[in-house]
Structure formats: structure tokens, C-alpha cells
Image (cartoon, rainbow, N blue to C red):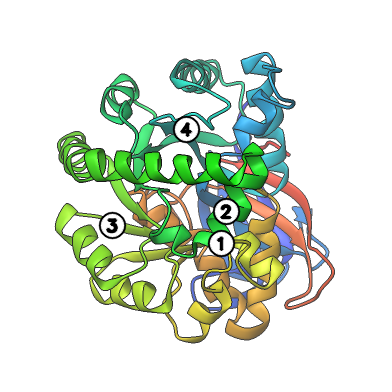
Amino acid sequence: MSSLPTEEVFTNARIVLDDEVLHGSVLVRDGRIADVSEGTARNGLDCAGDHILPGLVELHTDHLEGHYLPRPKVRWNIHAALQAHDAQVAGSGITTVFDALRVGMDEDAALGSKDMADMADAITEATADDRLRAEHFIHLRCEVSAPDVIPAFERLAGNGRVRLASLMDHAPGQRQFVDLQTYRTYYQGKMRMTDAEFDRFCARRIAESEANSPRSRRTIADRCREAGITLASHDDATADHVEESRDLGIALAEFPTTLEAARLSREAGLSVLMGAPNVVRGGSHSGNVSAKDLVEIGVLDVLSSDYVPFSLIQATFLLAGSIGLPEAAAMVTRTPARVANLDDRGAIRPGLRADLIRVRAEVGAAVPPVVRSVWREGRRVA
């Protein structure tokens, strides 16, 4: 990457601020936003009326795994896989990304704990060597029903890039898979099991959940509080789930599966996260609550690209047609930065990092936006 420019001006741009879109200019000096002003400057980069937004902040994506394991049993060079993932993330306008690595394995996992440790090490090394376009942190996806989740968590929790952990349980009959037919469609199709094999599989998963989940949730939550790692719940569906999350010190409710859980999470002081693919597709692929339903009742705070990096910017401009661009942009910039305790980014204000993206798009249009340029701390990275 090139060295930081001392000063640069972005002008003739539609600048997305906290509560308005301003036609004007942004002055960047030494990697920070120095000034925001109305009108067009004489000198500077002419943005031709494109939008300038803060760099997007992504809290939950396991997209890296697809680059590392591009085909069954094919492990790609981890450093090359990371850089390919990073290029796609940055090209989608994401300047801060939390790569979700799974801890707690079961028989359907294509990757193991060592693979996760290797990916964590690769992120740390590439960050130290300045080989990444976006800034990468680590999000530990803790499958609390798995027998090995606590030692697997301890193996990675000491990595300094770990800033977020989520507590999840994918056992059948609850949370994401209350509907056993949905669970059957997902797992029996994925693993090609007979009906008898599927029944045994469900019984084993339920037994593991009952044996491990309560203790693992509490142990990992306590460890996260001690280490200053932000905690997220996952797939809360009921009032009891939300009450448990509040008692554990959860800050972020990821992918609540019902309107009730989303509403109660917000009332309990949690930020609510849903998937941007849910917005783009018009609903959940699992048949759970729609993100747009949560927008309509005013309880959606954060969007995550989950499994499609570009969906984050696409969902932003789709939602902007109904709630306005400043509010939609906050879900992918300012609010996730606040949840992750990153107070130096997420908005276009003097003093904050010059993480900026230039986007050509029309609010609410079906045509996807075009991310034309991306800067991280004033450096052009895409």
C-alpha cells in the first residue's frame, strides 16, 4: 500500500452525514477527516455527484471459510485465501470486518479447530505486515452445545484481534430451527441422511445441547466480560431467551427469529442485528422473521452481510427508499462501530478516521449500487 497522503479533498459529492445528505466537500488530512463543508471546492477529487459514505463496518461474516475451503476437502493457501476474501470485502465498501471463526465442532463441520486457529493466525500476521485492505478483527462463533467449545474458545480468545463473540445453539426444536421440517430440509439434504439416520442425528444434537449449553454459555460469557470481548446472542426466539441474554451481559442480539424476540431485545437495551441478504431477498432463507418487518416497527439497529459481502451496501440503498439514507447507513457504519466499541470510525465527522467509500447509486433503486472507490484512513485501498 502507498503511504498516507498529507491532504486530499473530495468534492461535488453527496455526503451522508448522521442526519442529512449534504452536497459538499470532505477534507482529509493525515488519515483523518479534517472538515466537512457545503458547496464545491475549486481543487480536489471531483466525485461527480456520487455518494460519500463512511466505510462500512461488518460484524459477522464467515465468508473467509469459503475462500479457504473452495471445494470439499480442498484447503487453499490460507494467506492467499485471506487476501482474496479481503479484496472482495474491501471492494464491497467494507473497511472494518469481523471475520467469524467457529469454535465448537460437530460431525457436519467441514473445518476443524486447527483450521480456525490457522485462520486467526493468518489474520494477525497479515495485519502486522500491512497486507490487508480492510481492517480485520475476529468474531468467535461459539457453538455452545458442542462438547469441545470451551477449550476451543480458550485456544483463540487470547488473540488480540478477538473483539466479539456470539453464543449459538443450532440443536433442533429451538431458536433458528423451531420447525423440525425446516431442520430436516436443511440437514438431511446437506448430509444425505436416511430418515432413521436423521432421527438419531436429532436425538444426539438435542442431548448434546442439554448436556453442554447452559454451562458453556455461562463460562464463555464470564470469560468475555473478563477479557473485554463484546458478547452477542444468536437466534433468540422467545422471551426466556432474551431474559437469559440480558442476564449474561449480551450487547448484541444477532438474527432474532421472531418479532417478539427482536422487540424484547431492544427493550432490554440490546442492539438488534439482522442479515443484509434477508433485506435483499425480501425474507429469511430459514423462514424466520423478515428484516423489513423489524424496520417497520423500528427495532432494527445493525445489518450484517453474513454470507454475501456486497449485500451490505445493496441493502443500505434498498432500505434508504423507506427510511432515508442517513438512517439506513447508520445500520452499517455508526451503530456497528459503537456496538464493537470502535469510537474512532463509523461517521463522517472531523477527527474520525477517513474510512470513506464513493458509491454511485440511487436510493431505493432495484439496480445494485456501484462502489467506485474505497479509502481506509485516507489511503485508497479499492
The residue indicated by pointer 4 is: 101
Determine the CA span between mark 4 and mark 3. 19 Å
Judge by depth and name the residue closer to the eye, 250 or 26: 250
Name the secondary structure under disc 4.
Answer: strand
In what element is the residue under mark 3?
loop
Mark 1 neighbour density, 10 Å: few (under 14) some (14–19) many (20 or more): few
Q: Which residue, given by chain and number where applicable, does mark 3 sit on?
A: 251
Sequence-wise first label, 4 or 3: 4
Residue type at the position of mark 3: Ala
Residue at 45% from the left image edge and 72% from the top image edge: 300
Residue holding disc 2 = 184
For the residues labelled 1 and 2, the Cα–Cα distance comes to: 5 Å
Query: Mark 1–mark 2 contact, CB under 8 Å?
Result: yes
Q: How far across and down, in percent of the image, does residue 52 sit?
A: 67, 61
Q: Is residue 5 above or below residue 29?
A: above
Q: Which residue is mark 1?
A: 181
Q: Residue 130 at x, y = what percent?
A: 57, 21
* CA gap, disc 1 and disc 3: 31 Å
